[in-house]
Image (cartoon, grey):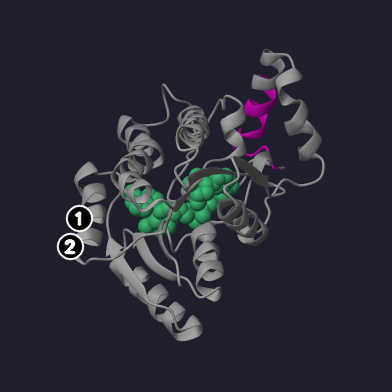
Amino acid sequence: MAQTALLTGSYGGLGTVLARIHASRGGNLILVGRSQEKLDAQAAELRQQCGVTVHTIAADLSRADEVEKVYTTVKANGWSVDYLMNNAGFGGQGDFACERSMEQDMSMIAVNIEAPTRLAKLFLPDFIERGRGKVLNVSSTAATMPGPLQAVYYATKAYLTSWSNALWRELQDTGVTVTALMPGAMQTGFVNAGGLADTALFAHAVSPDEVALAGYEAMLRGDLNVTAGLPGWQRPMMALASLFPKKAMLDFVYNQQVSGSAH
Ligand SMILES: NC(=O)c1ccc[n+]([C@@H]2O[C@H](COP(=O)([O-])OP(=O)(O)OC[C@H]3O[C@@H](n4cnc5c(N)ncnc54)[C@H](OP(=O)(O)O)[C@@H]3O)[C@@H](O)[C@H]2O)c1
């Protein structure tokens, strides 16, 4: 039977590929994003190319009432959700105290932390009752270290991985799994939206294609974590990151995220 995935941030870089992978395997979709126009265009394309059922829900996930609306819309329409893919999120370069506004950082916490937490709180009881269901939380390799010049973003992703892993254990024996996907730097809308285009961190950013596939398959297996999209030299570095002196690591991450560091 076709599985239905609810996907947030569906028309972004990674979301577009996740949607395409799921639909190309015959899965139905509920696409969630801010722009109804973009959702409609994406839904029409997926229906036409893959012959699957696609619903849309326009919602600004920085608002708690709109997140709740996602769940009430699903229930009101009698749609069934098998996979919950919490993908929407954004970053943003800048010094916490002087450059990033209160609104920017609080909205980031709302989208990156509160929205996935609320959606999981709402959908998980249904999954548990049914004895099956899969959650994919799109975190980041940023989860593994503090991120000077993206202080709040890195912290939101640390929350996401920690919380996902704890849920994975709590849900053992329920038939429900929670997987954290931790991509490295990807070439998506994230880069310009976060003012990161001229930083060294994004100089070797990869396409979201292989990341989406690794994440989707890890979700199907019910893996705990999956790291994907790191260029060769970054892999050993990530593995050894916890062994580096903390202050040297903070300097390194800072320097990678300074505007103009790509040159
Ligand atoms: N790109 C990277 O280097 C990278 C690395 C590690 C992890 N990630 C994570 O990967 C996920 C997908 O990001 P991406 O790289 O695909 O970036 P993207 O192309 O910018 O896509 C992000 C998506 O999130 C949506 N979104 C942002 N704010 C929203 C809000 N308030 N309400 C509803 N939707 C909202 C965006 O919709 P709008 O266009 O309407 O804003 C967009 O569809 C994010 O969680 C990100 O943190 C990205």
- Identify the residue at image location x=45%, y=84%: 51
Residue positioned 44% across, 46% down in the render: 89
Residue 151 against residue 48 in the figure, above or below: above
Q: Nearer the viewer, residue 54 or 41?
A: 54
Q: How far across and how far down the image is residue 88, in percent?
A: 42, 50
Gap in Å between the C-alphas at discs 1 and 2?
6 Å
Mark 1 closeness class: few <14, some 14–19, many ≥20 residues within 10 Å: few
| Residue type at the position of mark 1 | Thr
Looking at the rendered structure, the secondary structure element under dot 2 is helix
Towards the viewer: 216 or 96: 216
**Disc 1, SS:** helix
Verify whether residue 259 appears in magenta: yes
Q: Nearer the viewer, residue 120 or 147?
A: 120
Displayed quadrant of residue 101: top left
- Confirm if mark 2 falls within 8 A of ligand 1: no
Looking at the rendered structure, the kind of residue marked 2 is Ala
Quarter holding the C terminus is top right
Image quadrant of residue 24? bottom right
Q: Position of residue 115 (x, y in %)?
A: 33, 43
Which segment is the magenta one? Answer: 251-262
Which numbered circle lies on residue 72? 1
Whether residue 210 is visible to the viewer of this picture, yes or no, is yes
Confirm whether the magenta stretch covers residue 166. no
Above-or-below relation of 35 to 206: below
Query: At 57% from the left edge and 27% from the top edge, which residue is drawn?
Result: 147
**How many marks overall?**
2
Q: Would residue 192 be found to the left or right of residue 129 on screen?
A: right
239 relative position to 223: left or right: right
Residues at discs 1 and 2 in contact (Cβ within 8 Å): yes
The yes-or-no answer for disc 1 within 8 Å of ligand 1 is no
- In this rendering, would 25 be left or right of 86? right
Q: Which residue is mark 2?
A: 76
